[in-house]
Image (cartoon, grey):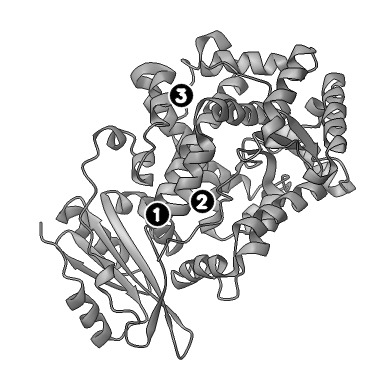
Amino acid sequence: MPPSKFPQLRSLFLSTLLVLQFSSPSRALVEPEVEAWQELVAAVEESIPLLGSSIPSDAVQGVGNFASSMAFAPLSDLMQELELRRGLKFKYFTPWHVKDKTALRFFISKALEKEYTPEKALKEEALLKALGLVALDFRIVPFTEELLTDAVAGVYDPDTDQFFLVDMERGQDLKTKFMSKAGSLILGDMGSTVIIHELDHALGGQHFPLKKTFEQITEQSTLDRRMAALAVVEGDATFVMMDHQYKYDPKLAGSKTQVLGADYLTDMLEFLTKFPVPLPGMGKYSEAPLFFQKSLVFPYYSGAEFITKIRWDNGWESVNEVYKELPASTEQIYHPSRYRYQSTPPDIPDFSKFPEPFGKWETVTDDVGGEFLLRVVLEQYGVDNFRVAADGWNGDKIRVFRHKETGGLGFYWVIRWDNNIDAREFYQSLASHLPFVVEQEEHLTAISLAFTPAELKKLRDLLPFPKT
């Protein structure tokens, strides 16, 4: 059974507001040359009305070259700056758009409609519900639409090789405008910072096979691998965004910028969600389940720290090489040295040995959670040292079941550790916190929910654990 897809809109790269992008980019979106570019975009779209709200992908490069040759391409200063900071040249100007919140919601709604079938939505919901990460009445599609509409400041779409920015002030009520101004006073205007982030995605799309890579990852891979790959792309854009924000000389190509302490940045974000003045984009984020908060933050902060440490080897050339062989796990994002020296894939028990159905249980989905999901589960259940307890992960598999009579959910999660010490440390951290059955055998841990002792014995007999 193919693995489920999680709510990250895998075909899109989203610049969330969060701690780096609270304030409105409106000042950057009213410059005369930008308005002129939007008039050109509108003219092209009106000439081909059946294609919707974006220039057709096969015409993108031609339109971009035309705009550049006519000195009609806005943001040329930022593009030249980014070329220096990132060490790559634009091959052509990337068309882009400005949307208000209403248009953004429509765009996200259509993307979700394309991404999710009812079956896929049920699989994703089942895993989150089985682990206790969301409520039993949780519905992933409407929730994700609300969350992203509230938090997104820009989107790059590799399918059409275009991006758009969100005019946060257009159509806002007085209260929301006040919050936008408050955010600007606290963090400063972030307009050019958001644009640099999206331009970096566009630049990467011209040099790396992002569309093909993410199509393959989405269809064939696991939660763990998808989160790791997303961290490379968003970490790249976040790194140059911070380099721009620090106002370092672009000719230094980011050599002075170091994005470290991703865990500290995440803690800072949690503090800001409690700020007395509600900041734009934080309403839905602060109300979201922990899994979704971490899913939004991890690619940016942990990804930027990964990019920082990879750059220490040989500058941007080292980062460019990563796109040829993306990290295999979120463990490698959290611990970049393991990207270089990771051993062969771990030996994990083969779930194909489970009978289908297993008694009165039928399989809903299989996946690999990785160190990312382990951290979330541990933190969700109050393990203070969740980062330390999750360290030492060396592979896992999780299967979610549904009871054919009651409709109840259960799961069986096997985690392999680097050694017996890491396994024991994890067991000791979990045992008094999780409402699950937790078993340890040498370097392996099995976590399960909803099975009787007799059913658990059958599962263990069917799934002999490999020995060290």
Say few, some or many: other residues with alpha carbon within 10 Å of mark 3 (under 14 / 14 to 19 / 20 or more). some
Q: Which mark is residue 345?
A: none
Locate residue 462: give its quadrant: bottom left
Image position of 278 with respect to 58: above or below: below
Q: CA distance from mark 2 to mark 3?
A: 22 Å
Q: Which mark is residue 294?
A: 2
Say few, some or many: other residues with alpha carbon within 10 Å of mark 2 (under 14 / 14 to 19 / 20 or more). some
Tags 1 and 2 in contact by the CB under 8 Å rule? yes
Q: Which mark is residue 258?
A: 3
Could you say whether the residue bearing mark 2 is in a helix, strand or loop? Answer: helix
Taking the spot 53% from the left edge, 19% from the top edge, the residue there is 86
Please state the horizontal and vertical placement of residue 248, each as a whole percent of the image.
Answer: 57, 14
Please state the horizontal and vertical placement of residue 109, each as a whole percent of the image.
Answer: 71, 56
Tell me if I can see residue 248 in this picture. Answer: no
Q: Earlier in the sequence, mark 2 or mark 3?
A: 3
Image position of 106 with respect to 136: above or below: above
Pick the residue in front: 261 or 461.
461
In the image, taking residue 3 as reference, residue 140 lies left or right, namely right
Pick the residue in front: 42 or 88.
42
Q: Which mark is residue 375?
A: 1
